Image (spheres, rainbow, N blue to C red):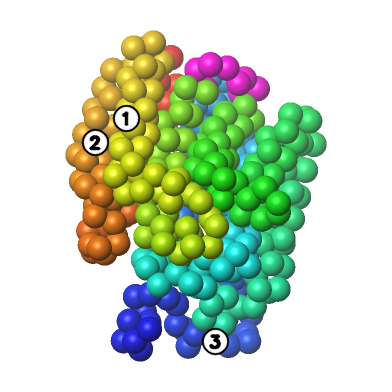
Amino acid sequence: MPPDSLEVTGPSVQQFRGDSFRANANRAFNATRPKFFPASVLPVIAGTAWGFHVAGQFDFVVFLLALLATACVHAGANVLNDVGDDFGGTDRSNDDRIYPYTGGSRFIQTGIMSVSGMARLGISLLTVAAIAGLVLMLMRGWVVLGFGMTGVLLAVMYSLGPVRLASMGLGETAVGVAFGILPVTGAAWLQSGVVDLESLLFAVPISAWVASILLINEVPDIRPDGSNGKNTLPVRLGLSGTAILYVAIQVIAVLAVITMAVRGQLPITVVLLPIGLLILVVRAAGAIREGIADRQRLTAAIESTLAIHTLGSLWLAIFALYVAIFAA
């Protein structure tokens, strides 16, 4: 790797050196890949907005605990995924990565943190999530345990242990559930005590948008993933098949929003933004077909997919709050 490309393809060791508390905290925070935190934070916000719409009341403490637990599960999963991918060899052999979006945090490969240090960080984050979940369980009952354990299991089984869902082509589904269905319906239930067809339907587009993030992020990693036995969907489908699946997932999100509007869950104007975002979807699909051959275009497509999730999730949250406050 040429020295002048270091800042593009991986983190700088010099940037994260030091033994002070601030330096250690900075390393730990960046090891969690914080650019992806909206993928877990926004579903909780949207689900809370839906729960407020259903119940007409808002518990701020419960919201903060749910946010903390979900963010820590996400951060811990990211860190442990780096550990699993290092053991599997995928990150070590990944020269096609688009940092900081694909190929992991690179903290192990660059020597910023050790494998054992990353493992301890991941376990610590999951422990904090468990403590927040325990407090929620004491406040809201045993149902919290079901939501929490399912999320933690999916986070761990994604890349570690004998199952390794990502290697089975089930990683995208697992992420869609863990960072879509679970946090949206869970946050809604914490506020309202209700999990029904309407809350599940509200979670579908957010699940689809987050699954699309993982799907497109796996495109630059096709070669190293495939050569190390991590048979993700892009490895199995190839570039053209992945582009088709990407569009299909995004269309499912739009259809779910249209269904909510038709059912009267949300105003008909809710469909405007998701339909408009399909312009970005078409462009991203074209970039997927080119793959890593056009690195700049694929990077823009990854960033567009992150934007689709962010804008779409906030859009649904705003409409849920609008219905709760002005249309009740």
Q: Please report the residue visible at 47 percent of the width from the left and 22 percent of the height from the top.
A: 201
Residue at which label 3 appears: 17
Quadrant (top left, top right, bottom left, bottom right) of the C terminus: top left
Q: Secondary structure at mark 1?
A: helix
- Quick one: SS at disc 2? helix
Instruction: Name which residue lies at 53% across and 62% down.
Output: 228
Q: x and y percent of residue 246 in the render?
A: 34, 40
Q: Position of residue 168 (x, y in %)?
A: 57, 45
- Residue 232: within the magenta? no
Mark 2 vs 1, N-terminal side? 1
Residue 190 locus on image (x, y percent):
64, 30
Residue 308 sits in quarter: top left
Q: What amino acid does circle 3 point to?
A: Arg
**Distance of label 2 from label 1 (alpha carbons):** 8 Å
Q: Is disc 2 in contact with disc 1, using a CB cutoff of under 8 Å?
A: yes
Occupied quadrant, residue 243:
top left
Percent x, y of residue 192 = 61, 23
Q: Is residue 316 visible?
A: no
- Give, as a single range, the part of the protein colored magenta: 191-199
Residue that mark 2 sits on: 278
Three-letter amino acid code at the position of disc 1 = Val
Residue under numbered circle 1? 251
